[in-house]
Image: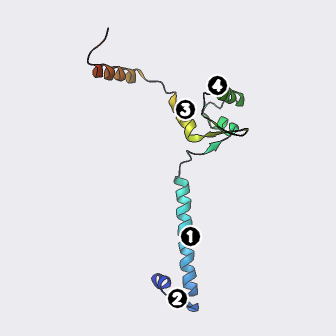
Amino acid sequence: MQENILQNEISFNDMPKALAYLISKVDRLETLLSVSKLEQPDSDKWFNVQELCEFLPDKPARQTVYGWIGQKLIPYHKKGKKLQFLKSEIDAWLLGDKRQSVAELQAEAAEFVAKKGRIVR
């Protein structure tokens, strides 16, 4: 029936079946759209200053964030007088302050020495 509906003209008698078919298609599309929205990361979400303060792990005061902005320590965008922060840039900024462990430092030093071929004293 489904293929016949798409290929032939629909008669008045076929209307209930055609309508049921269309409703089932719309339901499946809505389900797919709602699932895809849940799976999409919100990495490009925009924050204002208050939302940023709530998002950051240590929940800084607004004055602290304004200080970071003044010192250009945090990535931000300014549209007129409005400050905005992109979540993906804030995540990268948070990860950028990672300190290396002793093992990572030793591996980096060993790699450097291996590339140079000798130890300089």
Kindly indicate whether the residue at mark 4 contacts the one at mark 2 (C-beta within 8 angstroms).
no
The earlier-in-sequence mark between 3 and 1 is: 1
Q: Nearer the viewer, mark 1 or mark 4?
A: 4
Q: Callout 1, which amino acid?
A: Asp
Residue 44: percent from left, percent from top: 57, 45
Q: Nearer the viewer, mark 1 or mark 2?
A: 2
Spatial CA distance of label 3 from label 2 is: 60 Å
Residue 85: percent from left, percent from top: 63, 39
Residue count near mark 4 (Cα–Cα under 10 Å), binned few <14, some 14–19, many ≥20: few
Q: How many marks?
A: 4
Spatial CA distance of label 1 from label 2 is: 23 Å
Residue count near mark 2 (Cα–Cα under 10 Å), binned few <14, some 14–19, many ≥20: few
Spatial CA distance of label 2 from label 4 is: 69 Å
Q: Callout 4, which amino acid?
A: Gln
The earlier-in-sequence mark between 1 and 4 is: 1
| The C terminus - image quarter | top left
Name the residue beneath numbered marker 1.
Answer: 27
**Residue shown at the point (53%, 52%) measured from the top left:** 40
Residue count near mark 3 (Cα–Cα under 10 Å), binned few <14, some 14–19, many ≥20: few
Name the residue beneath numbered marker 3.
Answer: 94
Kindly indicate whether the residue at mark 1 contacts the one at mark 3 (C-beta within 8 angstroms).
no
- Residue 45 to residue 70: above or below: below
Relative to residue 84, is residue 5 drawn left or right? left
Name the residue beneath numbered marker 2.
Answer: 9
**Residue shown at the point (40%, 20%) measured from the top left:** 102
The earlier-in-sequence mark between 3 and 4 is: 4
